[in-house]
Image (cartoon, rainbow, N blue to C red):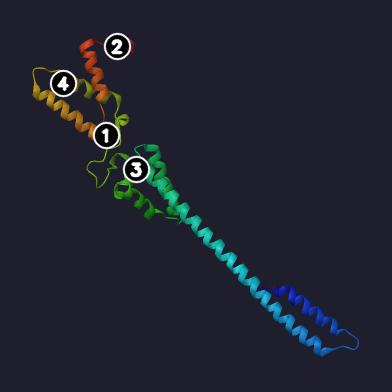
Amino acid sequence: MTINHRAEAKKHLATASRYLFKDPADTQVAEIAATIGQGHAALARDEEQAARTADLQEALHSLRRRFSDTRTLVAHHIADGLASREKDRWKAALSLSSALDEAHCNVDDLVDARLTDDGWDPRSAYKTPASLVPDGNPWAVKPDITAEIPERVRRLFAEHLARMLLNGGSETAQLWARNFTYALKNEGVDLTGDIEKRITELTLGRDPSDPPF
């Protein structure tokens, strides 16, 4: 059975007050009631303090849990940005990481762990986006960076590779062109579409719907 010490304290202190001011005063009963009331009051204070302490501990635990979850989410966001081939996203992730360092909220350990789990070398992640190379898996597919290659460079490669592939008099040239095309694709530069288009142009003529430039 739970005792309401606050209520008991009020009751006994009221009794002490009533007997103390009774005419004639019964000081013995008043003293006993006051002592009992003070005891309940002390117990009530202890219970309230214990409840406040428990509430504070729970609040602190909740804040720590939220802080840990927030650090993990932010670290994953930074890691995904650093592993991105998108320059603006990579720069934003690097900037956020630096800002957190300045605010004494370093999350590099979590970022490195995320990058490692995803197969990236954390040491390379803070360099240029083009230097990000998957680590530990030689069969990992490289990110597609074809769009980062200037159009004029793609056209130049496509021109020469298409002509080599159409060179029926040289199997060596055709083999070299195929191997070079596959090597580029393995590194994330897929020129297959450009080469096929140029082969079509060389054999059938330019598509009339294409702009003349």
Task: Give the percent coordinates (x, y) of residue 54.
Answer: 58, 67
Residue visible at 38% across and 46% down? 79
Q: Is residue 155 visible?
A: no
Ranked by sequence position, the earlier of labels 3 and 2 is: 3
Task: Give the percent coordinates (x, y) of residue 142.
Answer: 27, 37
Residue type at numbered disc 2: Asp
Kindly indicate the quadrant of the structure image that contains residue 84: top left
Decide if residue 106 is on the left or right side of residue 135. Answer: right
Asked if 76 appears above or below 26 in the picture, the reply is: above
SS label for mark 4 = helix
How far, Cα to Cα, is label 3 from label 1? 14 Å
Residue visible at 34% across and 48% down? 115
Within 10 Å of the Cα at label 4, are there few (<14), some (14-19), or many (20+) other Cα atoms?
A: some
Ranked by sequence position, the earlier of labels 1 and 2 is: 1
Kindly indicate the quadrant of the structure image that contains residue 7: bottom right
Asked if 206 appears above or below 90 in the picture, the reply is: above
Residue visible at 27% across and 44% down? 134
Within 10 Å of the Cα at label 1, are there few (<14), some (14-19), or many (20+) other Cα atoms?
A: some
Q: Badge 1 is on which residue?
A: 188
SS label for mark 1 = loop
How far, Cα to Cα, is label 3 from label 4? 35 Å
Ranked by sequence position, the earlier of labels 4 and 1 is: 4
Within 10 Å of the Cα at label 3, are there few (<14), some (14-19), or many (20+) other Cα atoms?
A: many
Kindly indicate the quadrant of the structure image that contains residue 59: bottom right
Asked if 100 appears above or below 5 in the picture, the reply is: above
Q: Badge 4 is on which residue?
A: 165
Residue type at numbered disc 3: Ala
Which disc number belongs to residue 83? 3
Q: Badge 2 is on which residue?
A: 207
Ranked by sequence position, the earlier of labels 3 and 4 is: 3
Residue type at numbered disc 1: Gly
Residue visible at 24% across and 18% down? 198
